[in-house]
Image (cartoon, rainbow, N blue to C red):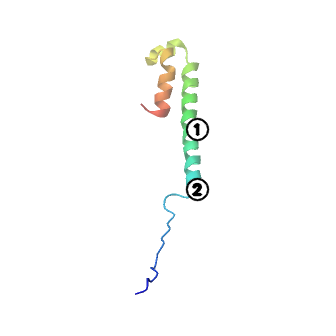
Amino acid sequence: MKDEPMAFITDIRTGGTTWAARFAALRAQWAENAAKHKVYRTTVQELDSLSNRDLADLGISRSMIHSLAHEAAYGK
């Protein structure tokens, strides 16, 4: 018998996300990071504008301002 050619089937799938979807996700992440950083900056500015007496009434020392702002913006 003569060797007969075999049939081949190729299945190419473009699984995963598209370039546009990845770019959209990246833009969304940038926007989320910018919003969180804005919360951080605003919190620092507001707490920094308080007098030492006002901060003491709240139970906050000046050295705690940045850590409190970080927690407010980014969580623990």
Between the residue at mark 1 and the residue at mark 2, the CA separation in whole angstroms equals: 22 Å
Secondary element at tag 1: helix
Image height of 58 relative to 33, above or below: above
Image height of 23 relative to 50, above or below: below
**Which residue is at the front of the view, 20 or 66?**
20
Q: Residue at x 48, y 70 (%)?
A: 11
Marks counted in the figure total 2
Q: Which residue is mark 1?
A: 34
Residue type highlighted by circle 2: Trp
**Residue 63 horizontal/vertical position (percent):** 49, 15
Quadrant the C terminus occupies:
top left
Can you tell which of label 1 and label 2 is closer to the viewer?
2
Label annotation for residue 19 = 2
**Residue 65 horizontal/vertical position (percent):** 50, 20
Q: Residue at x 51, y 22 (%)?
A: 66
Secondary element at tag 2: helix
Image height of 24 relative to 53, above or below: below
Quadrant the N terminus occupies:
bottom left
Image height of 50 relative to 9, above or below: above
Q: Residue at x 54, y 33 (%)?
A: 39
Other-residue count near label 2 (Cα within 10 Å), few / some / many at <14 / 14–19 / ≥20: few
Residue type highlighted by circle 1: Ala
